[in-house]
Amino acid sequence: MLIFNKKSDLSAFLSPLLNQNKSIGFVPTMGALHQGHLSLLKKSLLENDVTVMSIFVNPTQFNNTEDLDKYPRTLERDVQIMQDLSNNIIVYAPEVEDIYEGYTASESFDYDGLENQMEGKHRPGHFDGVGTIVKRLFEIVKPSKAYFGEKDFQQLQIVKKLVSKYNISVEIIGCPIHREANGLAMSSRNERLSEPAREKAAIIYQILNSAKEIFKRNSVVETHQFVENEFKKHPEFQLEYFEIAEETTLLPISEKESNKKYRGFIAIFIENIRLIDNISLN
Ligand code: PAF
């Protein structure tokens, strides 16, 4: 398995492959790999001649320094996990300097309002940081396809908007959420949870599933009330938001309309660790 730390070395390696019209599949990550990441890698390995995975904890997408400092960094273990999966994965694991060249700041992006909802509202600047790094990585790797998990559903929509607005020639592939046996959405942040909290966090998905049933027969307001009341019974959780939004615009709704697809989105803290999840409601 090849590991590059410098974009110049990675580009020099990929350039002849691009000249031979080899297709490059790309899986951008911040490391601390789990089964969800591996499912993206497996799909890319199947669908492309070459697969590149980046591992980079991108400072500009964190609006909270404690969250950035505590983000799990497990490069050696990640490399081992990838080696066990396939020897054909090209890893790009740069330092901040290689990406930001002495100026660690975000560019600003207009995603037609997608950035103003949910994660964008609660993590100011987050999607400028995501857009900055994803655009730079696309420029370096020049992938034909790039794979993103639906756990970060808003991020997936934002990346689709980024490539269409900035005419970046890459197909964005969204992949289903992977869940632990108890239903908790897989996330690198789960590593920071104590065992009891990891078990308790199973109720997030249970409540989302119940909300889906409630939503079928009840109003949007009643569905919100249900979720809020359920979490009040579990004071170890602090609910940041539960939103019901239309899937493509991500605009929150107050009433259902026929022929529209809706999702429930949640951000919640347990042990001061912020978890997000979402579910298709219809
Ligand atoms: O989803 C993530 O892990 C990150 O937001 C991404 C897409 C790798 C950009 O840093």
Image (tube, rainbow, N blue to C red):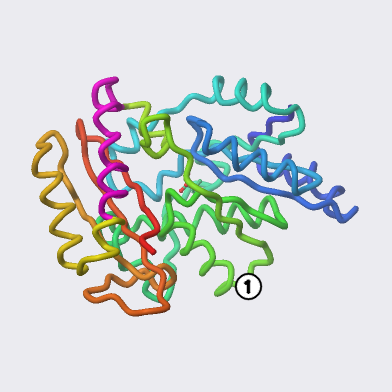
User: Where residue 85 appears, x then y in whole percent?
Assistant: 68, 27
Is label 1's Cβ within 8 Å of ligand 1? Answer: no
Residue type indicated by callout 1: Asn
Q: Nearer the viewer, residue 218 or 255?
A: 218
Question: Is 248 located above or below residue 47 in the figure?
Answer: below
Instruction: Name the main secondary structure of what is drawn in magenta.
Output: helix
Residue 168 colored magenta? no
Considering the image in quadrants, where does the N terminus appear? top right
Name which residue lies at 67% across and 22% down: 84
Seen in the image, is 189 located left or right of residue 6? left
> Residue 52 in the image: x percent, y percent?
69, 42
Residue 180: where, in percent of width, then height?
Answer: 42, 32
Q: Which residue is mark 1?
A: 167
* Other-residue count near label 1 (Cα within 10 Å), few / some / many at <14 / 14–19 / ≥20: few
Residue placed at 33% from the left, 58% from the top? 125
Return the residue found at the far right: 20
> In the image, what residue occupies the spot 54% across and 54% down?
134
Q: Residue sitting at 36 percent across and 52 percent down?
A: 278
- Count every numbered label the image shows and give the total: 1
Q: Position of residue 99 (x, y in %)?
A: 55, 46
Quarter holding residue 10: top right
The kind of secondary structure element at disc 1 is: loop
Q: Which residues are magenta?
A: 193-211
Q: Identify the image quadrant of residue 54.
A: top right
**Residue 256 falls in which quadrant of the image?**
bottom left
In screen coordinates, is 233 left or right of 2?
Answer: left
Image quadrant for the C terminus?
bottom left
